[in-house]
């Protein structure tokens, strides 16, 4: 004869199943709401005059190996306003947080391009210009002694530069500025790389226009976005004193290294460290 299970046991069994189901549902819900791994910011590297994006290669390799998405767009080097507008449009194609890095003239470009962009979480200046509104990079170079771009402050064109005239698309005239090949290793590299490597870089340098050098900057992003600054103590293009002045004015977290103007070429490890400090800062 078969006996029916007591009703009490059946009720307890049903309650247990319901409790287990409830616990499983709660666990799944908690799992869904656990914070996932924080997305690392995209690092955007902006080169300046007399260089190109390839100059960032040592920094790019290190950042990529540490899991960062990195991009190094070309800077037109035609006008500060136009170069900043170009970069501002480029930044709109990137989703999520951005750490924006500028070297040399590229610092002036990021200063203008990042203004009003909520995705830019940090600015990093690498031996770079950080102009205030109404300042030009030409004026900032001359503000402090120490640049070897010219040994004649009254010369119409700095004596370390070659001025190459060209025709603008509208038919007007423009001037491209190149560092003279025999001056490049000293002025740009502080004699820190071999003569052979310096000659290669001098031959492939990208010029900046006189218009870009003289054009005044707009509202600076460093007034609203946290910034970091790497001062190159051996800089012979932008005087180290000018770099310290700009870093202090921007209230930037400042690191100094014994490097030349192109410190991203001679010491990419130090440059990478500064960028990653900005990337993880809260």
Image (cartoon, grey):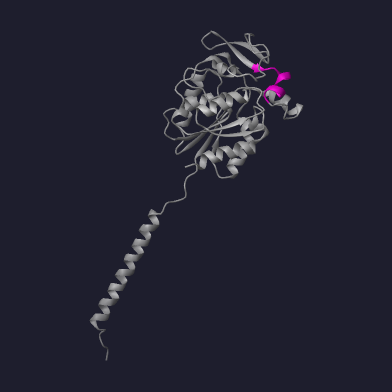
Query: Residue 212 placed where, x, y %?
Result: 54, 17
> Which residues make up the magenta segment?
178-188
- Residue 200 lies in the magenta stretch: no
Query: Residue 90 placed where, x, y %?
Result: 48, 29
Q: Is residue 233 visible?
A: yes
As drawn, the residue found furthest toward the right would be 195
Vertical placement of residue 211 versus 63, above or below: above
Q: Quadrant of residue 70?
A: top right
Vertical placement of residue 83 versus 14, above or below: above
Q: Quadrant of the N terminus?
A: bottom left
Q: Quadrant of residue 191?
A: top right
- Point 56% across, 37% down: residue: 275
- Point 66% across, 15% down: residue: 150
Q: How many marks?
A: 0
Q: Quadrant of residue 197?
A: top right
Horizontal side of residue 20 vs 123, given as left or right = left
As drawn, the residue found furthest toward the left would be 7
- Residue 184 lies in the magenta stretch: yes
């Amino acid at each position: 004869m078969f006996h029916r299970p007591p009703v009490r046991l059946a009720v307890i069994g049903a309650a247990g199943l319901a409790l287990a189901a409830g616990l499983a549902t709660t666990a799944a819900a908690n799992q869904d709401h656990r914070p996932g791994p924080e997305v690392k910011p995209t690092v955007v590297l902006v080169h300046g005059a007399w260089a190109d994006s390839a100059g960032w290669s040592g920094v790019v390799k290190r950042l990529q190996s540490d899991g960062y998405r990195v991009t190094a767009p070309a800077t037109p080097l035609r006008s500060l306003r136009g170069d900043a507008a170009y970069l501002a449009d480029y930044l709109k194609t990137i989703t999520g947080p951005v750490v924006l890095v500028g070297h040399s003239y590229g610092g002036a470009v990021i200063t203008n391009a990042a203004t009003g962009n909520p995705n830019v979480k940090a600015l990093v200046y690498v031996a770079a210009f950080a102009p205030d509104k109404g300042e030009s990079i030409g004026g900032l170079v001359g503000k402090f002694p120490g640049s070897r771009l010219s040994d004649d402050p009254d010369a119409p064109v700095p004596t370390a530069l070659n001025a190459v005239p060209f025709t603008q698309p509208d038919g007007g005239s423009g001037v491209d500025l190149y560092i003279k090949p025999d001056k490049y290793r000293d002025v740009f590299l502080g004699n820190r790389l071999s003569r052979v490597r310096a000659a290669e870089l001098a031959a492939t340098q990208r010029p900046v226009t006189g218009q870009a050098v003289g054009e005044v900057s707009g509202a600076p992003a460093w007034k609203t976005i946290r910034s970091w600054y790497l001062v190159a103590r051996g800089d012979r293009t932008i005087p180290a004193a000018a770099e310290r002045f700009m870093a202090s004015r921007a209230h930037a977290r400042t690191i100094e290294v014994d490097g030349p103007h192109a410190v991203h070429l001679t010491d990419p490890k130090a440059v990478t460290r500064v960028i990653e400090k900005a990337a993880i800062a809260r």
